[in-house]
Image: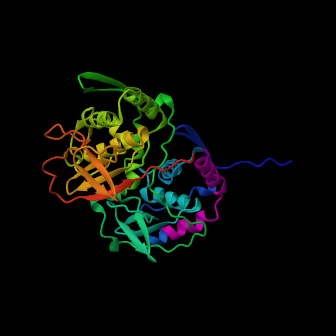
């Protein structure tokens, strides 16, 4: 019996709760110029299309299925694989070509364009993404995946010419929705102490937080409010917070419990506007807010929404003013100022610090006569008896 010798190089790296192992066959090692051009892309594809890539793609798909990775998390894995095969710092163009090829062979409709000696990498996505460039091809929308790498060097979209290469497997849209966080290894968490005062009593929390969360969302775009408000917590962070909150709320009625969560979100964290803190608007997922030193109104609205949904599961609306985002909750008994939406009354619950110490049903006087928009309405799913 002849033994098959596996050529190439073996790689292994930690990826959140697991370890990803793969062999890069020597046929996958393809020299590429550092100068981005359509000709180089086509030469690269002609060679890699005949390479032994099946095992790598099969490994990736199996890992995605085993760990239930959303597309955005899966893309982080593909980025790491491309980095192993062709380090980004050595040849950015080559690194991008591997990401593009792997995504396509995993079934996603990813495209490339070149111009100004730049390679622009984008993927088919029909979701409402507001802060990154997109291209339209045959009435289909493609979001730019590497805009952040160029920043101010990025030209207008028409400066880049798409490269037409048909890849049969590349059929699927990509989604930015993160509906499940990875199960990080427990040893990757740190303790973060949080406290706040409610009705003359101090409450202490020892949160488990993981800095990898920031890496996951480092280049995450501004998604639509429904996607944003439904990003969950990772298992360890959830276990360090939600049971403690439920215990603290056990003897409170609904109104006082919601008031407690509102004030926890408002006062347990330091406030700073994204423009001042980061120089741009960035919406933090709830776990990022728990991890970060500072947060603003968008971040707190998302965290408060998550806590109310997880503990009380009440209907809620996200209310957007020209320069502020807040939440209103459909309580069993409406309190104070309410807004009516689809025949229901929702009481304002302000989770961000204001000049006045606002109670449930109170809204900042500066907003009372401002126009607002309901940007997301949450309706709990009814469970069958």
Residue at horizontal 35 percent and vertical 29 percent from the top: 252
Residue 335 figure quarter = top left
Count of numbered badges drawn on the protein? 0
Furthest-front residue in this view: 333
Furthest-right residue in this view: 1
Q: Is residue 297 magenta?
A: no
Left or right side of 135 for 75: right
Residue at horizontal 35 percent and vertical 56 percent from the top: 376
Dominant secondary-structure state across the stretch colored magenta: helix
| Residue span colored magenta | 41-66
Closer-to-camera residue (21/290): 290
Left or right side of 268 for 98: right
Picture coordinates of residue 365 (x, y %)? 13, 48
Furthest-top residue in this view: 201
Q: Is residue 47 magenta?
A: yes
Left or right side of 176 for 67: right
Picture coordinates of residue 2 (x, y %)? 83, 49
Residue 211 seen: yes
**How does the figure colour the protein chain or chains?**
rainbow
Picture coordinates of residue 319 (x, y %)? 28, 53
Residue 214 seen: no
Residue 331 figure quarter = top left
- Whether 97 is drawn above or below 141: the answer is above
Q: Quadrant of the C terminus?
A: top right
Residue at horizontal 49 percent and vertical 67 percent from the top: 41
Closer-to-camera residue (2/332): 332
Picture coordinates of residue 165 (x, y %)? 53, 72
Residue at horizontal 34 percent and vertical 71 percent from the top: 157
Closer-to-camera residue (345/328): 345
């Amino acid at each position: 019996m002849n033994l098959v010798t596996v050529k190439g190089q073996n790689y292994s790296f930690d990826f959140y709760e697991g370890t990803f192992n793969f062999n890069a066959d020597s046929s996958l090692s393809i020299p590429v110029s550092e100068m981005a051009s359509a000709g180089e892309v086509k030469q690269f594809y002609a060679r890699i299309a005949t390479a032994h890539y099946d095992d790598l793609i099969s490994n990736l798909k199996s890992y995605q299925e085993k760990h239930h990775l959303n597309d955005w998390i899966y893309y982080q894995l593909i980025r790491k694989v491309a980095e192993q095969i062709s380090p980004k710092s050595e040849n950015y163009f080559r690194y991008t070509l591997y990401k593009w090829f792997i995504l396509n062979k995993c079934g996603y409709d990813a495209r490339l364009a070149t111009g100004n000696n730049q390679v622009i990498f984008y993927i088919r996505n029909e979701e409402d993404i507001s802060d990154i460039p997109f291209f339209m091809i045959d009435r289909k929308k493609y979001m730019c995946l590497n805009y952040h790498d160029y920043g101010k060097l990025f030209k207008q979209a028409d400066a880049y010419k798409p490269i037409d290469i048909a890849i049969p497997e590349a059929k699927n849209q990509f989604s930015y929705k993160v509906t499940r966080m990875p199960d990080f290894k427990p040893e990757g968490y740190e303790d973060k102490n949080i406290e706040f005062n409610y009705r003359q009593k101090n409450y202490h929390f020892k949160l488990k937080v993981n800095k990898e969360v920031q890496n996951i969302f480092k280049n995450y775009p501004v998604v639509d409010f429904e996607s944003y408000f439904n990003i969950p917590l990772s298992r360890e962070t959830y276990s360090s917070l939600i049971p403690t909150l439920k215990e603290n709320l056990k003897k409170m009625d609904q109104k006082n419990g919601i008031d407690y969560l509102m004030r926890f979100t408002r006062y347990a964290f330091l406030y700073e506007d994204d423009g001042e803190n980061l120089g741009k608007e960035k919406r933090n997922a709830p776990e990022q807010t728990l991890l970060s030193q500072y947060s603003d109104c968008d971040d707190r609205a998302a965290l408060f929404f998550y806590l109310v949904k997880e503990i009380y599961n009440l209907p809620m609306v996200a209310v957007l003013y020209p320069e502020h985002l807040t939440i209103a909750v459909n309580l069993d008994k409406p309190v104070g100022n309410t807004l009516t939406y689809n025949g229901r009354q929702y009481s304002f619950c302000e989770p961000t610090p204001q000049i006045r110490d606002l109670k449930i049903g109170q809204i900042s006087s500066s907003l009372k006569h401002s126009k607002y928009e309901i940007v997301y309405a949450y309706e709990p799913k009814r469970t069958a008896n």
